[in-house]
């Protein structure tokens, strides 16, 4: 009699449907393959133990990244700043006379006293918070066509040429408005669609539609006709209701609401581009940071330690620093903190540019167009209705290894057929898969 396998997390035995019955060779082989598949799933869920290297490194691996990193943003400024500090230090130590050195030391003490009172943290904190808030809100307000496509798929019923053409045309018009609106504020989209010829070439607009829209190269704030394809989509939907393609009056209202919400989101994003952060605010913060570190070039100099009276031999008074390290250690740390803070704001100030942390709008538009067309034009049927592994549970629990049942056995057998590794392809499973989020976010 076989032992019942134990659940590794709950410790209770998993009932075996084959227990107590005569098993055929084919049944034993099938059961063995199912157990091997379940063991493989356990290994994937439980994961491997943390290695000593990972424990020693921890999150320090983040500091070794280059893309979108502090080092990439500041290495030139830090190099120039350090060379300027050493240049002033060299002049102070070797090019000035004794009386000139004394005057320089008085100036250094005064600068050290005065520049430390600048409210640099207060100014930078509010400014960076404002810029980061605007950066995140602009991404959140970018519209997604998925909800509109689901409305179209559910309300414009039919797979004939006319309903299919209507659904696809409305999605294309919405994406056309998306491109024409966002490309006015996005450098990436302007590079991809510099004129209406490129828009026609990629298929978003027909030549007659492009002629009605115009050249779309106006530099005026409200000189674009990006709203016009949304108007065409509304006219098509209204005509479809009159022709009987949309039979639900509340559904027709909801569909127009989705088009209106899509237009509202585009307007919100365009408004951020029209109304930037006040220039005077940016100038005040930038000027404060640069003056702070310009004065610190003198105020943070290591001062020579010498006797106030050169003829003194006992109980003499001394001036200058007790330690002369030459290199400005803590000033470098402050430079990385404050200038890095300011560079964060500069990088996020315009999220529609071409920096590492700017929005990948080309990929986003490709995704929206592909998914939108797939939703409204998909001809694949939905999966058939079948009992799931929770069918016999009064209070279903989402467990990694649920209790054995007929549905669970059928699910495992289906997984074995669909996800079995072909012979000779085992090495491919060892390659680590990296999600797109992990590629962009160094913290993951």
Image (cartoon, helix red, strand yellow):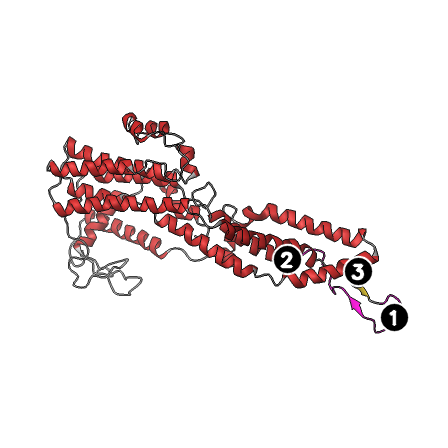
- Tags 1 and 3 in contact by the CB under 8 Å rule? no
Q: Can the viewer see residue 8 in this picture?
A: yes
Which type of secondary structure does the marked residue at label 2 adopt? helix
Q: Is residue 312 magenta?
A: yes
Number of the front mark, 1 or 3: 3
Q: Nearer the viewer, residue 370 or 270?
A: 270
The N terminus is located in which quarter?
Answer: bottom left
Magenta range is 309-329
Image coordinates of residue 197 in percent, x first then y, are: 36, 27
| Image position of 104 (left or right of 55) | right
Place of residue 182 in the rendered image (x, y in percent of width and height, measured from the top left): 37, 40
User: Which mark is drawn over residue 173?
Assistant: none
Which residue lies under the disc numbered 1? 313
Image position of 415 with respect to 390: above or below:
above
- Identify the image quadrant of residue 310: bottom right
Identify the residue at horizontal 32%, vertical 37% (top origin).
226
Q: Is residue 258 magenta?
A: no
Q: Is residue 212 above or below residue 18?
A: above
- Which sits earlier in the primary sequence, circle 1 or circle 2? 1
Q: Residue at x 10, y 42 (%)?
A: 247
Position of 352 compared to 41: left or right?
A: right
Q: Which residue is mark 2?
A: 331
| Callouts 3 and 2 close, C-beta under 8 Å | no
Q: Residues within 10 Å of mark 3 (few under 14, many from 20)?
A: some
* Labelled disc at residue 102: 3
Instruction: Give the mark nearer the N terminus: 3 vs 2.
Output: 3
Image x and y of residue 317, in percent: 81, 70
């Amino acid at each position: 009699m076989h032992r019942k396998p134990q659940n590794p997390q709950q410790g209770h035995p998993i009932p075996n449907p084959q227990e107590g019955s005569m098993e055929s060779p084919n049944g034993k082989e099938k059961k063995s393959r199912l157990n091997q598949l379940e063991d493989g799933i356990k290994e994937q869920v439980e994961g491997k133990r943390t290695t000593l290297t990972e424990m020693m490194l921890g999150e320090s691996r983040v500091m070794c990244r280059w893309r979108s990193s502090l080092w990439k943003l500041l290495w030139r400024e830090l190099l120039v700043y350090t060379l300027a500090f050493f240049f002033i230090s060299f002049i102070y130590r070797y090019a000035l006379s004794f009386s000139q050195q004394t005057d320089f030391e008085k100036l250094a003490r005064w600068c050290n006293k005065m520049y430390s009172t600048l409210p640099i943290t207060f100014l930078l904190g509010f400014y960076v918070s404002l810029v980061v808030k605007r950066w995140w809100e602009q991404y959140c307000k970018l519209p997604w066509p998925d909800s509109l496509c689901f409305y179209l798929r559910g309300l414009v019923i039919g797979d004939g040429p006319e309903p299919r053409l209507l659904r696809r045309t409305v999605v294309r018009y919405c994406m056309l408005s998306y491109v024409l609106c966002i490309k006015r504020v996005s450098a990436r989209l302007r590079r991809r669609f510099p004129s209406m010829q490129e828009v026609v070439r990629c298929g978003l607009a027909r030549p007659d539609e492009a002629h009605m829209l115009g050249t779309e190269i106006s530099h005026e704030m409200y000189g674009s006709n990006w709203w016009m394809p949304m108007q065409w989509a509304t006219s098509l939907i209204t005509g479809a209701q009159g022709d009987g393609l949309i039979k639900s009056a509340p559904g027709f209202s909801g569909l127009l609401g989705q088009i209106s919400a899509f237009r509202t989101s585009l307007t919100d994003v365009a408004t951020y581009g029209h109304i930037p952060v006040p220039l005077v605010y940016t100038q005040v913060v930038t000027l404060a940071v640069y003056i702070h570190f310009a004065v610190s070039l003198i105020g943070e100099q290591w001062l020579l330690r010498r006797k106030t009276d050169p003829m003194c031999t006992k109980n003499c008074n001394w001036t200058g620093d007790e330690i002369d390290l030459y290199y400005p250690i803590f000033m470098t740390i402050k430079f990385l903190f404050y200038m890095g803070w300011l560079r964060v704001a500069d990088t996020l100030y315009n999220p529609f540019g071409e920096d590492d942390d700017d929005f990948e709008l080309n990929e986003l538009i490709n995704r929206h167009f592909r998914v939108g067309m797939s939703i409204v034009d998909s001809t694949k049927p939905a999966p058939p209705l079948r009992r799931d592994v929770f069918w016999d549970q009064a209070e279903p629990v989402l467990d990694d290894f649920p209790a054995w049942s007929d549905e669970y056995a059928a699910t495992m057998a289906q997984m074995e057929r669909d996800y079995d590794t072909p012979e000779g392809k085992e090495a491919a499973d060892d390659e680590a898969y990296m999600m797109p989020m992990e590629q962009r976010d160094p913290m993951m």
